[in-house]
Amino acid sequence: MLVKQTMGSPKEFREKVRKLRTALLEYGRDENVLPRLQRLKRLGYIEEIPNRTQRMVGAIDMLRFFIVPAAADYYDGKGINFRFHTLLRFLDDPASLIDPTGFNSTRDAIIGHVMQVVHANPHYDFQLLASFEDGLDEMERQIRTILDGTHPRAESIRAIVEDPEYHARLLDHLAEYRRNPNISPLRRENIEGKFEEVERTFGTVPSAMRYFTRMPRTVRGGVRHLWRVRRFPKDVAA
């Protein structure tokens, strides 16, 4: 039932596959990514723009040290099968799972990703959406349509999200964040303590990009880092 609900109709799923193919073909191209990074730098979110290799290595570290282990721990605590939940997320929006940094993703893919799953810290995505002129306005609008049931993916997103109260909390927090971007983040319940240190590094765009710029600049150096570094490197953490 959940698989069918998240896939949508055959026509809807064909459109999702089309968007995935486009995302894969465009992935990592500097002409698509750099204008958004430059806008975030102008807005003060980024001090230095990491090069392509640094972004790729940093994204892999973000996945293996933060996103995957923190999510698996959360789902385990909720009694949710992590692999099956990831499958549902893929069926709901395949393109949203191939880009951990979000710099290769469209505005709506980022918004859908935030609405799909209870986030460790949504401030990263709020700041990421600042790379679009209307990013936060559109996010607020789409959350409201999830809550009133008029969003085209409302049924599939509701089938995935782990907490039925999440969207209401997210909407309230987004409104507070827009009034004061320095408010404390809406952290997921399993972050404090166990994942707090790594969340400080990857939970916001400024701290994540500082980490990325400390990664090797060459492909050879990047491969060496990924091969040798098997634990979160606290010496380059936030």
Image (cartoon, helix red, strand yellow):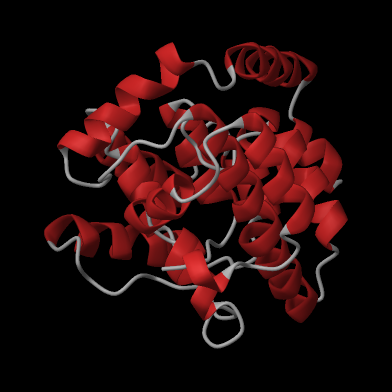
Q: Quadrant of the C terminus?
A: bottom left
Residue 202's place in the image compared with 39, above or below, is: below
| Closer to us: 155 or 52 | 52
User: Would you say 124 lies left or right of 194 here?
Assistant: left
Name the spot of residue 62 as percent of width and height, x first: 60, 54
Name the spot of residue 195 as percent of width and height, x first: 58, 77
Q: Residue furthest bottom?
A: 193
| Closer to us: 9 or 230 | 230
Image point 58% across, 13% down: which residue? Answer: 26
Q: Residue furthest left?
A: 179
| Closer to us: 222 or 74 | 222
Residue 154's place in the image compared with 208, above or below, is: above
- Count the marks: how many? 0
Image point 86% across, 55% down: which residue? Answer: 83
Name the spot of residue 48 as percent of width and height, x first: 30, 41
| Closer to us: 130 or 29 | 29
Image point 39% across, 71% down: which residue? Answer: 186
